Image (cartoon, helix red, strand yellow):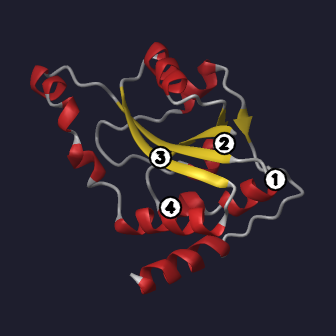
Amino acid sequence: MRNILVPTDFNVSSFDCFPNICKQLDLEEISFVFVHVFKLSDSITDLLMLSRRSRDFEQISDDFFAGATAIKKAYPQIKSIKIEFLYGATLNMFRDFLEVHDIDTVLEPACCFLGKIHKASIDPLVLIQKSGLPVLTLRKDVKLQKSAVPATVEQELMEA
């Protein structure tokens, strides 16, 4: 099984390249871990409340959750889709995160990361580059099928 890190801002367009990834990886089982990275606060109150960070999940739209469900149904080789937040911008924290989640590949950030969702959000590109983690890029011979996922997401939302 391949565990792929997906740096994201939780935009539904993050799923646009998934059909191509599944095609590129053929019948290999895949697990995706969506992550958004936040700068660690200096405030003792913020640090004490890290375990109660449910408000960060409020940044994720219902469309994104529906998209995750739809894409998982559409491609049986996707075994799981997880959503995580990483609080901290050091390379050691990032490597620990990768180890805990057994990540072996990162999806090319250009496919899925568009921007910040909060003033404390940081761009994970530097951490990814310094980690030495292999980056999964879409092959040039695989055409991008952007319409495949939004249509599925739309259907999923209509059924709900």
Among the two numbered marks 1 and 3 on one chain, the one whose residue lies closer to the N terminus: 1
Question: Closer to the camera: disc 2 or disc 4?
Answer: 4
Q: Which residue is mark 1?
A: 24
- Residue drawn at 14 percent across, 24 percent down: 48
Tag on residue 108? 2
Q: What's the distance in space between the residues labelled 2 and 3, CA to CA?
A: 18 Å
Residue pointed to by mark 4: 68
Q: Which residue occupies the foreground of this view, 2 or 40?
A: 2
Asked if the residues shown at circle 2 and circle 3 are in contact, with their CB atoms under 8 angstroms apart, the answer is no
Q: Nearer the viewer, residue 154 or 138?
A: 154
Q: Is residue 111 left or right of residue 49?
A: right
Three-letter code for the amino acid on which mark 3 is drawn: Lys
Identify the mark nearer the N-term, 4 or 1.
1
Check disc 2: other Cα within 10 Å, few if <14, some if 14-19, many if 20+: some
Task: Say if mark 3 contacts mark 4, CB within 8 Å.
Answer: no
Is label 4 in a helix, a strand or a loop? Answer: helix
Using the numbered discs, state the Cα–Cα distance from disc 2 to disc 4 in whole angstroms. Answer: 18 Å
Query: Given the image, on which type of amino acid does mark 1 rest?
Result: Gln
Quarter of the image with the C terminus in it: bottom left
Secondary structure under the numbered disc 1 in the rendered image:
helix
Can you say whether 69 is above or below 138 in the image?
below
Give me the disc on residue 82: 3
Q: Amino acid at mark 4?
A: Ala
Task: Measure the alpha-carbon separation of dots 2 and 1.
Answer: 14 Å
